[in-house]
Image: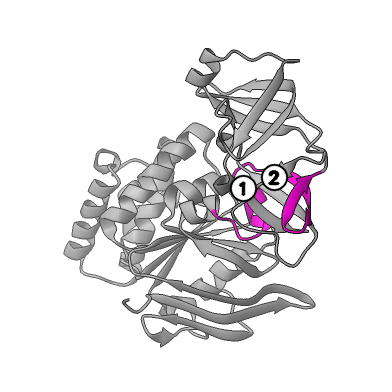
């Protein structure tokens, strides 16, 4: 395997008695779209600021292109940071906003013009080059801010919650746009976000942070389908949890029913079995597990229904995701009795 573009080794950062970053190790590769995902206070923004050089680690190494940049000032790193606020100059045109960093580097005017024209084509805003920021939509301003960061051709582009100011529909569109632009430029992107959907849609790999520590990293499919902790399972997507006890290798739910999983509950007698709502099926009683209960609520989401099932196997309603065609074939109403089934391979088990 080729050498990583960025290596983070045992990096630590304290603010007084608070351990903001507590011994993180990560490798990030050339042309990768990498997401740092976590709730507020998880350490993701502190780590991003250390990569940018705005915070210095108390311990550990940050190696970029084979060089330790842990103590290198921000302006001497081949790194650019795009802020959530965009911070565009209101009195400058789109083209001047993009060109500003290159002008500060005193590059030849012909090269500046060529680079700006090139990136305006990439972000599809050539026709708005002479407009001011207040004449643009939110998505257009976001693309201008991205272009200003990319035009300097950094080895690494850091994005701090770049889509947070956009509405839901535009945010979804810009997720795909960011991915397209990253693919076209071939620059390594590292995005900080608390939005799990954003991370799953855009990133090649995702790192989940909690309390300054790395819980898990992997492809979106790996961390969604194979979470390594209850926190990761609960934080990524929606998950049902069934309290279980284990006796002689057999898992039993709180109502005494057996739950079958491909992985045992190791070194513990109590835990939780977990299954995604979309893995629960009506019918198909040849599957390994089943629960029965009463429908307490139904939420219509257009493409699918989310059914809430009260069952003695769980203290909380079990969520079932049914596609629209399945719901049409077997209409369900509040108060109906329902049995759902799922496979052992779709069951994760965690100690508590």
Nearer mark to the viewer, of 2 and 1: 2
Residue 270 x, y percent position in the rendering: 80, 57
Residue at (76% x, 55% y) in the render: 271
Residue 168 x, y percent position in the rendering: 53, 34
Query: In the image, which residues are magenta?
Result: 226-253
Q: Is residue 74 left or right of residue 124?
A: right
Picture quadrant where residue 97 is located = bottom left
**116 is within the stretch colored magenta:** no
Give the labeled residue for mark 2: 259
Separation of residues labelled 2 and 1 (CA atoms): 9 Å
Give the labeled residue for mark 1: 347
Earlier-in-chain disc, 2 versus 1: 2
Residue most extreme to the front:
248
Count how many numbered circles sit on residues in the image: 2
Per the image, label 1 sits on a secondary structure element best described as: loop
Per the image, label 2 sits on a secondary structure element best described as: strand
Which quarter shows the N terminus?
A: bottom left
């Amino acid at each position: 395997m080729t050498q990583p573009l960025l290596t983070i080794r045992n990096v630590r950062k304290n603010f007084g008695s608070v351990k903001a970053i507590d011994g993180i190790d990560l490798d990030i590769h050339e042309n990768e779209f990498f997401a740092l995902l976590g709730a507020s206070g998880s350490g993701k923004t502190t780590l991003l600021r250390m990569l940018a050089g705005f915070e210095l680690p108390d311990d550990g190494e940050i190696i970029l292109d084979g060089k330790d940049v842990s103590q290198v000032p921000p302006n001497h790193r081949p790194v650019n940071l795009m802020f959530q606020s965009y911070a565009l100059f209101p009195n400058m045109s789109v083209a001047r906003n993009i060109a500003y960093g290159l002008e500060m580097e005193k590059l030849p005017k012909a090269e500046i013009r060529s680079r700006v024209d090139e990136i305006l084509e990439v972000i599809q805003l050539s026709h708005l080059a002479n407009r001011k920021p207040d004449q643009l939509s939110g998505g257009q301003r976001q693309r201008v801010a991205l272009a200003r960061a990319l035009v300097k051709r950094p080895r690494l582009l850091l994005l701090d919650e770049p889509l947070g100011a956009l509405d839901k529909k535009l945010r979804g569109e810009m997720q795909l746009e960011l991915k397209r632009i990253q693919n076209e430029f071939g620059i390594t992107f590292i995005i900080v976000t608390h939005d799990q959907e954003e991370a799953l849609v855009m990133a090649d790999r995702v790192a989940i942070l909690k309390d300054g520590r790395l819980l898990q990293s992997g492809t979106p499919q790996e961390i969604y389908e194979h979470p390594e902790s209850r926190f990761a399972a609960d934080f990524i997507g929606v998950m049902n949890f069934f309290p279980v006890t284990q006796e002689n290798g057999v898992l039993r739910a709180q109502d005494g029913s057996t739950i079958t999983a491909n992985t045992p509950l190791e070194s513990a007698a109590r835990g939780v079995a977990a299954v995604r709502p979309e893995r629960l099926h009506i019918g198909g009683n040849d599957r390994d597990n089943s629960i029965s209960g009463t429908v307490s609520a139904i939420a219509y989401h257009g493409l699918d229904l989310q059914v809430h099932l009260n069952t003695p196997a769980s203290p909380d309603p079990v969520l079932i995701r049914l596609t629209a065609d399945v719901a049409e074939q077997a209409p369900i109403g509040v108060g109906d009795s329902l049995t759902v089934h799922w496979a052992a391979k779709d069951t994760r088990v965690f100690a508590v």
